[in-house]
Image (spheres, rainbow, N blue to C red):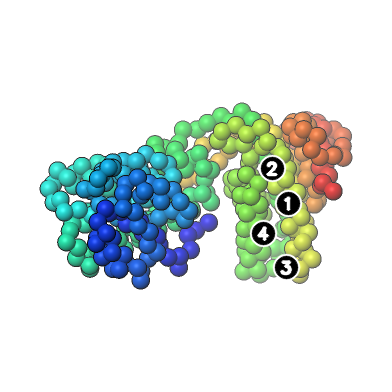
């Protein structure tokens, strides 16, 4: 989710001087939500409390942990490492600034404070932080978490063979005829609303949308670290998709029906393209899942034996028998019954 634009930013001020804390708090309290700490140890404790600060103003010369040590600790913790740190100090030696930047500091403000400079630098770094969060939120729409982590920390993502995942395809029955009777604006509005809800279902169930192609929606569960519940999660995604469509049809003039197919197996995952890149998965298991969807029953979740065997008797099924899948031969398929 993108950060709310009107959310008041939280600034943590760390200084052992009560006078400095009062000066900075008075200066900033009308602009931001303020938290204060009189020691480095307390600052680290507060930084981990929810809601976490969006920026830290950090004094360097403090008893106990000094500002450099606090900054090092903040940057070493994955939960706080992306919070920008602005050092506040009476030091003005180049070597001190160099050390501060090496420790991960974003900027320096020298004492005595110039109110306009303090406000301007905090505003700049909070805006940069906000844009970074928006970019990462957008990436999460487009890419799985493990791929985002690789891109941020390594600058690249190496294609990976995922040996055991589940793949879902969903498309709409009679979509072509529907497009002929609907305006382009209404068609896009309908698909956006439906796919937007599908995205939320995937997030809630621990699955990842891979892409949409026209009226087709493709999702996967089990990417990243091995997850033995990937088939259960994606089956629940499919059932939730259908329940949403049922509910929406009762309230909406446009009536939709969808087919959903799921197969489990191995895939290759990687980023395709250079300037307009896309994360995609490929392999025989993907092709089988697509074929299963095309043979599926409208408003039911159709699965292969490979997926059924991973559901650990959590559902009941209706056997469809051996079904001929284009290019794959005959395979036993099953309809999943929703839980009572």
Separation of residues labelled 2 and 4 (CA atoms):
17 Å
CA separation in Å, label 3 and label 4: 18 Å
Of circles 2 and 3, the one toward us is 2
Sort mark 3 into few (<14), some (14-19) or many (20+) by Cα contacts within 10 Å: few
Q: Which mark, residue 181?
A: 3
Residue 194: give its label.
4
Would you say the residues marked 3 and 4 are in contact, meaning their CB atoms lie under 8 Å apart? no
Q: Position of residue 27 (x, y in %)?
A: 28, 68
Of labels 1 and 3, earlier in sequence is 3
Q: Which mark is residue 234?
A: 2
Question: What's the distance in space between the residues labelled 1 and 4, CA to CA?
Answer: 12 Å
Identify the residue shown where x is 16% and y is 61%. 112
**Quarter assignment of residue 262:** top right
| Sequence order check, earlier mark of 1 and 4 | 4
> Residue placed at 85% from the left, 48% from the top?
340
Residue marked by disc 1: 240
Task: Name which residue lies at 75% across and 68% down.
Answer: 252
Which mark, residue 170?
A: none
Residue 165 position in % (x across, y down): 64, 34
In front of the other: 130 or 267 = 130
> Hey, which residue is sitting farthest left in the picture?
93
Give the CA distance from mark 2 to mark 1. Answer: 10 Å
Height in image: 182 above or below 235?
below
Q: Mark 4, residues whose alpha carbon is within 10 Å: few (<14), some, or many (≥20)?
A: some
Q: Mark 2 or 3 closer to N-term? A: 3
Q: Secondary structure at mark 1?
A: helix
Label 2 to label 3, Cα distance in Å? Answer: 33 Å
Q: Earlier in the sequence, mark 3 or mark 4?
A: 3
161 and 15: which is toward the camera: 15
Give the spatial CA distance, label 1 vs label 3. 27 Å
The secondary element bearing badge 4 is classed as helix
């Amino acid at each position: 989710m993108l950060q709310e634009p009107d959310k008041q930013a939280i600034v943590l001020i760390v200084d052992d001087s009560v006078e400095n804390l009062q000066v900075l708090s008075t200066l900033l309290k009308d602009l931001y939500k303020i938290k204060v700490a009189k020691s480095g140890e307390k600052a680290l404790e507060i930084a981990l409390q929810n809601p976490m600060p969006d920026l830290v103003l950090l004094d360097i010369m403090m008893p106990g942990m000094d500002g450099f040590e606090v900054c090092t600790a903040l940057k070493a913790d994955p939960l706080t490492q992306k919070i920008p740190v602005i050092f506040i100090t009476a030091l003005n030696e180049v070597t001190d600034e160099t050390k501060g930047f090496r420790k991960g500091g974003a900027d320096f403000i020298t004492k005595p404070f110039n109110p306009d400079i303090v406000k301007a630098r905090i505003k700049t770094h909070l805006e940069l932080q906000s844009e970074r969060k928006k970019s990462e939120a957008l990436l999460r729409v487009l890419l799985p978490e493990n791929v985002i982590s690789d891109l941020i920390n390594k600058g690249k993502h190496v294609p990976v063979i995922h040996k055991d995942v589940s793949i879902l395809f969903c498309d709409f029955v009679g979509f072509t005829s529907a497009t002929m009777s609907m305006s382009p604006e209404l068609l896009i509005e309908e698909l956006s609303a439906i796919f937007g809800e599908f995205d939320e279902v995937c997030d809630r169930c621990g699955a990842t949308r891979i892409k949409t192609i026209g009226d087709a929606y493709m999702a996967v569960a089990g990417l990243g670290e091995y997850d033995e519940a990937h088939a259960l999660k994606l089956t629940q995604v499919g059932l939730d998709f259908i329940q949403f469509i049922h509910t929406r049809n009762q309230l909406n003039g446009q009536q939709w029906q969808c087919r959903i197919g799921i197969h489990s197996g191995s895939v290759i995952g990687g980023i395709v393209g250079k300037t307009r890149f896309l994360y995609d998965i490929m392999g025989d298991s993907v092709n089988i899942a697509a074929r299963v969807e095309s043979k599926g029953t409208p408003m039911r979740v159709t699965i292969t034996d490979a997926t059924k065997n991973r559901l650990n008797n959590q559902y009941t099924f209706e056997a469809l028998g051996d079904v001929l899948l284009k290019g794959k031969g005959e395979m036993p398929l099953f309809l999943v019954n929703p839980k009572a």
